[in-house]
Amino acid sequence: MSPIPTQAGSGRTSARTRSLFLAALRFLVIVATTYLGLLAVTFFIGRVIPIDPVLAVLGDRAPQRVVDRVREEMGLNLPLYQQFFIYVKGALQGNFGTSVLTTNQVMDDIRRVFPATIELATLGTIIGALFGIPLGVLAAVKRGSLADQIVRIIGLIGYSVPIFWLALLSLVLFYAKLQWAAFPGRVDVVYEYSFTPVTGFYLIDATMQGKWDVLWDLIRHIALPAALLGYFSLAYISRMTRSFMLNELSQEYIVAARAKGLSETRIIWGHALRNAAVPLVTVIALSYAGLLEGSVLTETVFAWPGLGLYITNSLQNADMNAVLGGTIIIGSVFIAINLLSDLLYRTLDPRTRTR
Amino acid sequence: MKPLLDIEDLRVTFPGRSGSIQAVRGVSLKLGRERLGIVGESGSGKSQTGRAIMGLTPPQATVTAKKMMFNDIDLLTASARQRRSLRGRQMAMILQDPKYSLNPVMTIGRQIIETLQTHESVSRAEARDRALAMLEAVQIREPKRVFDLHPHEVSGGMGQRAMIAMMLVAGPELLIADEPTSALDVTVQLEVLGILDRLVADRGMGLLFISHDLRLVSTFCDRVIVMYAGRIVEELASADLANAQHPYTQGLLNSLPRIGHDRHPLPVLDRKPEWAL
């Protein structure tokens, strides 16, 4: 009998607990360092860009006396390391200061606009994965066929045509000509106050409150932008699925599965895709994170009150608190999604599990 | 007695950049419930012969033959669906390296059960019992534990035994073993071969043993076929290996090391172009 390369017997549970603890610790350290790096970079950006926050608040006609006082109030006369410390402390408490533009707390603003972006990005990613994966599988299985070429063209168009242009065209077609889609925006003014935004995710709020007419209106508004973002991520996901699938289909275990007499369907979806799913998770997660950053152009064209639009507006008005707050939130979401995809990766691929 | 497998003039042709390439050029063989070895160097067409019998030739290649009978089934006219139902249930194949030929994200147990469920309608409990019994049959000491392991968690020898279990669990009559021990350590090789030998004998299966190891094949098989450049150049009983006629076989035998003999300088094959005609 050959030796079995896995540990067995006594001491296994305690070793396991310890390794789990170490994994959790490493996890925390990674998150903390990444987050600190994110804060440092945003702080640095906030200091080097040639925008004077005092000027942004007071305008350029304020007397020097007032400028000096506001500068002191903002803590800008303190040494840099103290400023950074205050910045980190605020960021950890979710306090990014007040927006000059809206005069609200930046965090409150973000709480209001981010759900809109999350809603759009989530729907877009679901659409992208739902269509992109099967298309990619099809292209890989029928490699070199007409179907493969068609999927390639669909992908190329989605990837290379500017999305705002497609957005404008789709508005012309579906809103102006066919009148299927609603006017740009998130909800019609008529319905704006007919339900209470509890979670901020309007689709969920409307469903929970049984406001079906509102839900229908919301769907009519979100359908076009979600479909466009979906198409954009479909283009990427289908290309990646194709190449992962081609790689898996050339493996020996596929020959073995055929030698067992499995059907092609089972081989493709049960064996090859199950293996291709491992790297695919990362691809989809990253594409989701990309959409969450707020697709500024799409949000602009569809007047979608999301994070991308909010940050762009703030940037154009030199509202640094809002810009940095938004950037930190996006960065945090990025870190979170990366960790999540790492965890998912572990559950999908037994080889990466720490035993 | 009617042979299990009867092949005449098998050819496998691959399309190439400059015309097509024949990997197998007219192989004829008959196999009963015995152990037939195919030896040859890389590219001699031995693996493609095995895959053509299984119906696992890559789609771009074409298989032709004058005759290709398995039991009473004409493999040349059988539909793809029919060929598939044969695979795993009546003919099976063991591949070279369990590291690559087992699905890395599926437990060993599930991979064995999958073969069963493809060909028989069995209950989950029965499938599990039979898979465990099969693991025991390939001399895995703790079948219950190995059942739940993933391929990367077992050694090469253990993996190859799991592979054998997966391929034999539905009770095929013909087994094609394509270099089943080449990726294993020498000591493990013998164990795996012993297990394979006993299962083949107990179940009265026909075995096509593909290898590049002439010595191994001659001790393990009843008959040996020597292939060179897509053709059979010699066929003889294992015991008669010393009387090989073909210069290629003789050349191979001459380059084998022997205990107590000096093999310096190691003879080099003096390839004659007419061998490949």
Image: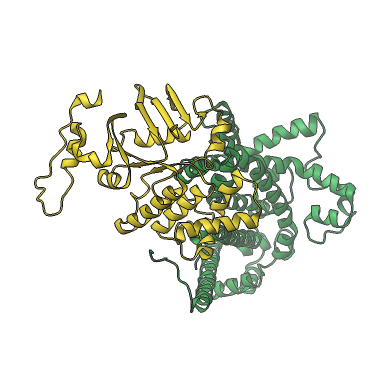
> Quadrant of the image for the N terminus of chain A?
bottom left
At a point 68% along the width and 50% down the height, the residue shown is A121
Q: Quadrant of residue B10?
A: top left
Q: Is residue A104 visible to the viewer in this orientation of the structure?
A: yes
At a point 46% along the width and 61% down the height, the residue shown is B140
Please say if A295 is above or below B237: below
Toward the viewer: A38 or A209? A209
**Residue A288 picture location, percent across and down:** 62, 51
Chain identifier matching the green colour in the rendered picture: A
For chain B, the rendered hue is yellow
Q: Is residue A51 visible to the viewer in this orientation of the structure?
A: no
Please say if A161 is above or below A26: above
Q: In screen coordinates, is A253 left or right of B253?
A: right
Please say if A316 is above or below B82: below
Q: Quadrant of residue A102?
A: bottom right
Toward the viewer: A142 or B158? B158
**Residue A75 picture location, percent across and down:** 60, 73
**Residue B58 picture location, percent across and down:** 45, 32
Question: Colour scheme in the image?
Answer: by chain
Exactly how many numbered labels are in the figure? 0
Q: In screen coordinates, is B101 left or right of A82?
A: left
At a point 35% along the width and 50% down the height, the residue shown is B181
**Residue A212 picture location, percent across and down:** 89, 49
